[in-house]
Amino acid sequence: MYQLKTKLNTTSEKFLASVKQYEKLLDKFYSDIDRVLAGGSPKSVEKHKERGKLLVRDRINLLLDPNTPFLELSTLAANGQYKDQFLGAGIVTGIGVIEGHEAIIIANDATVKGGTYIRETIRKHVRAQEMAMQNHLPVVYLVDSGGVFLPEQSRVFPDKEDFGRLFYNQARMSAMGLHQISIVMGSCTAGGAYVPAMSDETIIVRGEGTIFIGGPPLVKAATGEEVSAEELGGAHVHTSISGVADHIAENDDHALEICRNLFQTIPLKEKYKLEKKRVENPVYAAEELYGIAPIDLKKSVDPREIIMRIVDGSRFHEFKRDYGTTLVTGFAYLMGYPVGILGNYGVFGSESAMKGAHFIELCQSRKIPILFLQNISGFIVGKKYEHEGLAKHGAKLIHAIANANVPKFTVIVGGSFGAGNYAMAGRAYDPNLLLIWPNSRISVMGGEQAAGVLTSVKLKQLKTKGKEPDDKEIQSIRKGILDQYEYESSAYYSTSRVWDDGIIDPAETRNIIAMAISMSLNKPIEDMKNGVFRM
Ligand code: COA
């Protein structure tokens, strides 16, 4: 494979100024992360500890194999919403290693509003279950939750992807042969009681864990019966009388130890065998990505400059280098794993769309995972392009992405706009992991374009009503739209709503994608079945 050579002067003043500017973005990112890692209010954290309970991330640390990484997902979910009372959406989800098994962890943070579920909590929980299904991974639920956050009930209760989906997924996952273990370390009430009841095995902590469909206040209101939480559904009740739980633990540490012991009884899976090569570091430093990631999306970025900073030996075997040049495609190795990479270098046209579809078919036929580096403002517009059939060429790419059965990973490194988002494996295309860099922007079109379209629609409407807006009115319409797009297209807006699996530091991209490839190999790579390609 050919070793890529940078065309950038990474010691120039201009480059170093870009790095400095990016480091400011990272300061905000890490300070937001720190706020979430601190958990709920100091008062609720204190109350939690006084009960002898471990904080959620300490629980996870003890559950995982020592010195193995934990890839936390959507850490900044719900941030900037709900008056910031639901930092992290009150739940921690991620991928870690337990007794050698790659596993999904879904853990309530009881210090955040009693671990109750708002819309984003459910999205994180369901997304983590989806990842378990996509990658054939076992799941551990660390349960400590008051169930639905009742004031939000109309936004979390009845719809297909709402609270009920948690348990539907558990049943489907169980039927797929995915192991699910629950540790009840606190409250587990109403629908939430299904989580341990539907797991393969359940551990419950004495004096802390409770499981019931209706808690003591509800029982009192419904039947007049007075009963304590412990008597109604505590650890003794469920391990000795009801059989809803299987193992009793004396405290959090003990419960986590029992869970690790259970994992020793689960046979280790034979993973799909990709032909791995010896791992080599990239020739160029990952931190140089800070000077390359576009904060100003008008700045054009050659994706090769990104690729050479994340792949082994900075080596890249480029496919169709001189054809459809607004999309760069080729093969590389990442931590020893073969990977096919698609990176945008301008807008999509017919040639780049067809090249992308062809390349995805190559990856599929060789069963090589695909990495999409998204930095795309959309498809080229104009009569010439529509006449040459741009839509049908774009359709080929969409067919290929939607039906490819190899693991897919998407990293939004700059812009993610309109049909370009779809054509580069956006969320709707089920990538195994979708990550976003803090500088990125995502929306149906760029703010400038949207302001242009909407202002002209508005002006036409006003003119048919016989009104002739002056320049000041036109500017005010434009500004309103620009401001809205500026706010709604930020990476933070996206991640708060769980449209992605998390914002990442660009320098971590290589490590995270390697971990994601490893996790994806728990599922065999199947052949691809294509539909009708319009030629
Ligand atoms: N809906 C809305 N808010 C809830 C809630 C729920 N289901 N459960 C807890 N909360 C809120 C509390 O009002 C409190 O808010 P605050 O911090 O603004 O005061 C916060 O979560 C913590 O609750 P608190 O009772 O102080 O903490 P705790 O650790 O002593 O007890 C629970 C936690 C979950 C055991 C307890 O709050 C409880 O039993 N909640 C009701 C559970 C329920 O019946 N759920 C049915 C819904 S499906």
Image (cartoon, grey):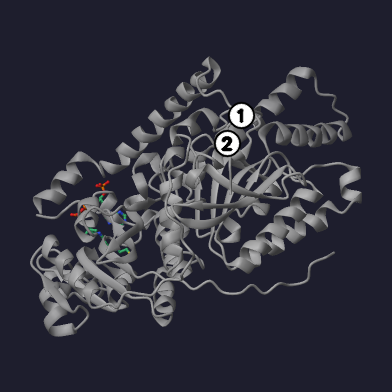
In x, y percent, where is residue 313? 49, 44
Q: Residue at x 52, y 34 (%)?
A: 439
Residue matched to label 1: 7
Quarter of the rendered structure image containing ligand 1: bottom left
Residue matched to label 2: 305
Q: Which of the two discs, 1 and 2, labels the residue nearer the N terminus? A: 1
In x, y percent, where is residue 466? 88, 30
Q: Residue at x 51, y 27 (%)?
A: 291
Three-letter amino acid code at the position of disc 1:
Lys
In x, y percent, where is residue 356? 70, 54
In which quarter of the view is residue 367 placed?
bottom right
Helix, strand or loop at label 2? It is helix
Three-letter amino acid code at the position of disc 2:
Glu
In the image, is 345 to the left or to the right of 125? right
Q: Residue at x 56, y 23 (%)?
A: 9
- Above or below for 132 versus 485: below
- Above or below for 7 versus 351: above
In the image, is 27 to the left or to the right of 324? left
In which quarter of the view is residue 463 placed?
top right
Helix, strand or loop at label 1? It is loop
- Foreground mark, 1 or 2, reads 1
- Above or below for 77 versus 361: above
Q: Could you tell me how far apart the alpha carbons at marks 1 and 2 are, in whole angstroms?
A: 8 Å
In x, y percent, where is residue 270? 39, 75
Give the total of numbered labels.
Answer: 2
Look at the image and tell me in which quarter the C terminus lies.
Answer: bottom right
In the drawing, what numbered circle is on residue 426? none
In which quarter of the view is residue 339 placed?
bottom right
Residue 86 seen from this side: no
